[in-house]
Amino acid sequence: MKLLSVADLHYTLKQFDWLIANARGFDALLIGGDLLNLASAA
């Protein structure tokens, strides 16, 4: 089983784009940490 683990993306679109492009090559995806940066204006 191939597992992709990512953490602390903080709403960085470049990192989300990479995740979407590469997640299909894995059996499971583990997302830890912060997905959003609450101090951001977005």
Image (cartoon, grey):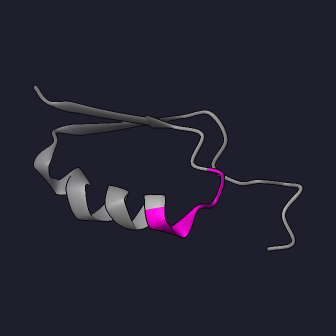
41 or 30, which lies in front?
Answer: 41
Compared to residue 16, the image places residue 25 above or below, namely above
Quadrant in which the C terminus is drawn = bottom right
Left or right: residue 31 versus residue 38 is left
The answer to which quarter of the image holds residue 40 is bottom right
* Residue located 85% across and 54% down the image: 38
| Residue 14 location (% of width, % of height) | 46, 66
The answer to which quarter of the image holds residue 11 is bottom right
Left or right: residue 30 versus residue 40 is left
* Residue located 77% across and 54% down the image: 37
Quadrant in which the N terminus is drawn = top left
Compared to residue 35, the image places residue 16 above or below, namely below
Residue lying farthest to the front in this orientation: 14
| Residue 6 location (% of width, % of height) | 43, 37
Left or right: residue 21 versus residue 37 is left
The answer to which quarter of the image holds residue 5 is top left
Q: Specify start and end residues of the magenta stretch as a single range.
A: 10-14
| Residue 23 location (% of width, % of height) | 24, 52
25 or 10, which lies in front?
Answer: 10
Compared to residue 18, the image places residue 9 above or below, namely above
* Residue located 66% across and 51% down the image: 10
